[in-house]
Amino acid sequence: MTLSEIPTGTFREGCIPVLETKRLTLRAPRLEDVKAMAQLANDKRIAENTRRIPHPYSPSDAEDFISGVNVPKGETAFLIMLRDETIIGACGLAFHEEEAPEIGYWLGVKFWGNGYATEAVRAVIDYAFTDLDHEALQAGTRVTNPASRRILEKCGFQWTGVGLCRIRALASSAPIDRFRLDRGLWASLKSWGEVKRVV
């Protein structure tokens, strides 16, 4: 299905809530976001630290991403925006048949170091455990990316080991640290405040 075949206001918008945190709004990506997403994600430092983002990242890559998420039984994705609606990154959940969903995220480089990723990840964790009723989440980060590791640890994820993961931008595999967060641990540690559902 291409973007032009997806009717406005269907599953994509209707089933993905808008989440608000203290500083951020998270919502489903839309066709009008293609240009901003492509400009923001077209940075080798982002691509080399994510599994699927290619480099260079073009508007057609953004279109492919938007058309492939938030469809029935597919990946759930949110754009991360500041309150002035500036797009600063993305965060979402990839679903696996026999494993816990995997949370993933990226931010534009100029927005690194402000705590935005931690805030967005916490909102998506809350959504996964409350709205979607999952029992556990998993995540991975390159072993060379200590900032991403700190984000996961601040959100309660526990290290489970090291594995290999194919990195599209590198056209090879790289070692990644694997993490897991169970519902019980999330419930006992959750102290980051409420996430407001707008829709």
Image (spheres, rainbow, N blue to C red):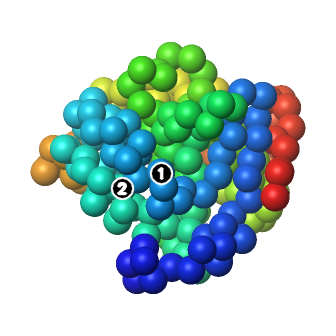
Task: Give coordinates of residue 140: x percent, y percent.
Answer: 44, 44
Looking at the figure, which quarter contains the N terminus?
A: bottom left
Looking at the figure, which quarter contains the C terminus?
A: bottom right
Q: CA gap, disc 2 to disc 1? A: 8 Å
Identify the residue at horizontal 58%, vertical 41% (top origin).
Answer: 80
Task: Give coordinates of residue 67: x percent, y percent.
Answer: 43, 70
From the image, state whether disc 2 or disc 1 is nearer to you: 1
Compare marks 2 and 1 and give the one earlier in the sequence. 1
Task: Give coordinates of residue 32: x percent, y percent.
Answer: 48, 55
User: In this rendering, would 118 be left or right of 3?
Assistant: right
Q: Amino acid at mark 2?
A: Ala
Identify the residue at horizontal 34%, vertical 45% (top origin).
Answer: 38
Count of numbered circles on the image: 2
Q: Which residue is labeled 2 in the image?
A: 62
Q: Amino acid at mark 1?
A: Asp
Tell me where residue 115 sits by quadrant.
Answer: top right
Q: Which residue is labeled 1 in the image?
A: 33
